[in-house]
Image (cartoon, rainbow, N blue to C red):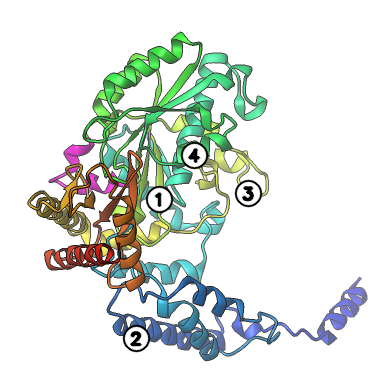
Amino acid sequence: MSELISNVSSTFKKKKYSKPTQHIFADTKESLLLYKKSMKKAIKQIIKNNENRDTPFTGQSITYLKNVIAEIDLYENENGQNLETVLEEIQKIYLDDCILFHHPKYVAHLNCPILTPTLVAEAFISALNSSMDTWDQSTGATFIELKLIDWTLDLLKYPQNGDGIFTSGGTQSNLMGLLIARDHYIKTRYNINAVMEGLPAEARKFKILCSEISHFSLKKNLSLLGLGQNAVVQVPVDENFKMSTNELKKQIEQLKAQGDIPIAIVATAGTTDFGSIDPIDEIAAVAKEHNLWLHVDAAYGGGLLISQAHKHKLKGIELSDSVTIDYHKTFYQPVSSSGFFMRDKSHIEYIKYHADYLNSKEQEEEGIPNMVKKSIQTTRRFDALKLWFTLRCIGIKGLSTYLETAIDNANYTSSIFNSRNDFEIIHQPEISAVVFRYTPYENNGTSYCNLNSYIRKAIFNEGKAIITSTKVNQEVYLKFTLLNPLTTTKDIDEVIELIIHHGSQYSIKN
């Protein structure tokens, strides 16, 4: 046997490998030196890029960016190129024209500027590459995540029996809420274990109620869950773009009368367009009356939980069965950092799966905390570390001031539009989104759509600011999503002047 082992060992020693092992991050002096030099070069380039850019976008054309990347031959050098060459290339094809979310005149989508402590955390996350599925891949990282889950459960005022997990984003968190709502209903109503037996025949009649302006992920997720997009029942909103409780009650009664089966309600705490918050406490009462699961999509509005000035807007969230919160929105974390939370940890049974090579039942009986049992992901980044660094370096009070500043900016913007005759604003901001349109002339029955569409595109192509648009009753409206606490009232005034300028240009051309 020893002779056989010696022969095999000799064979492998003689074999030459062409793998570039010098690039593997390890504990050797050579590896750590390369890491240090490489990171210093990357950081230097990022700093230089930020210093050299004074607009959120350069206005570069889509054709140019498409073509410049298409011209790159990935087979050009099979042994790779030095880092300096790659950095020069990435400057040209990405950094020169990337969108800068931290710029004070970026007021388009729900992209927040991120915090420096989170970038420090990212260095640890990427370099150490812990995977959060099992204890023997994460060790102390598990307890850091558990501590932050408990902290969020406390903010939600969920009972001691609550639980949660970090996720990739709101879509995944909403999927988990709908999945558990579906399987819990099947278990309690039909005594069927959907995990093992699948869906009952009656599932084709299952309905989920939400507001007519709720997030698109609800339809997408119900399709994935086998209930179909038609399982979504959209409840009309009131003049403040909040779900109408009276309409909700009518819809439930109507569904039952026609033989359909309502199983859950989704309330939205911060709609994507308006930032409107459904009356959660009233909806919770309806859900309780009809014995329906209540999930709250607080992907946008979750940050209000840490604000003494605004947390009252989420009144009733503590009565929900599950909640979605995106830390990478109003907690100012880098993508991705989100969470799913439930008031009763026993519902993990609808997700849990044991694999002998991963999280055996014996390990669970020993009390080993394997997080994979309550996640629909297996391999999962240690994204919780970013929030940990944030809370330890900045504190809850400091963190809360960022969103509070954004809300103040939204109210300022609203007051400006309300004071002018050439703008129309259709709601009072509840968080930090402002939906409006430029209306400089009497429309006489014609639409402002072309004008406002032109303004959005012209501003983007110019690059000095970035705003976005949406549709309300088939009419195009412009939208500010104000998340950056560095945005000043002067910045807002200047973006408004850009709107007026490009509106005038449209009038000249047309």
Circle 1 residues within 10 Å: few <14, some 14–19, many ≥20:
many
- Distance, label 4 to label 3, CA atoms, is 23 Å
Q: Is residue 265 above or below residue 425?
A: above
Task: Answer whether labels 3 and 2 touch (C-beta < 8 Å).
Answer: no
**At 43% across and 87% down in the image, what residue appears?**
41
Distance from Cα at disc 1 to Cα at disc 4: 13 Å
Q: CA distance from mark 2 to mark 1?
A: 30 Å
Q: Are marks 1 and 4 in contact (CB under 8 Å)?
A: no
Magenta part of the protein: which range?
300-314
202 or 322, which lies in front? 202
Q: Amino acid at mark 1?
A: Ser
User: Percent position (x, y) of residue 442?
Assistant: 18, 48
Q: Going 60% across and 23% down the picture, which residue do you hit? A: 193
Q: Nearer the viewer, mark 2 or mark 1?
A: 2
Residue 338, label in figure: 1
Residue 358: which disc?
3
Whether residue 101 can be seen here: no
Q: Earlier in the sequence, mark 1 or mark 4?
A: 4
Q: Which residue is mark 2?
A: 48
- Marks 4 and 3, the one that precedes in the sequence: 4
**Would residue 269 be visible to someone looking at this image?**
yes
Query: Of helix, strand and loop, which one carries label 3?
Result: loop
Residue 175: image tag:
4
Q: Position of residue 14 (x, y in %)?
A: 84, 87
The correct choice, above or below, for 452 with respect to 444 in the image is: below
* Inter-mark Cα distance, 1 to 3: 24 Å
Location of residue 336 (image quadrant): bottom left
In the image, what residue occupies the spot 39% across and 12% down? Answer: 253
The spot of residue 341 in percent (x, y) is: 39, 39
Which structural element holds mark 4? Answer: helix
Q: Check disc 2 and report its element: helix, strand or loop.
A: helix
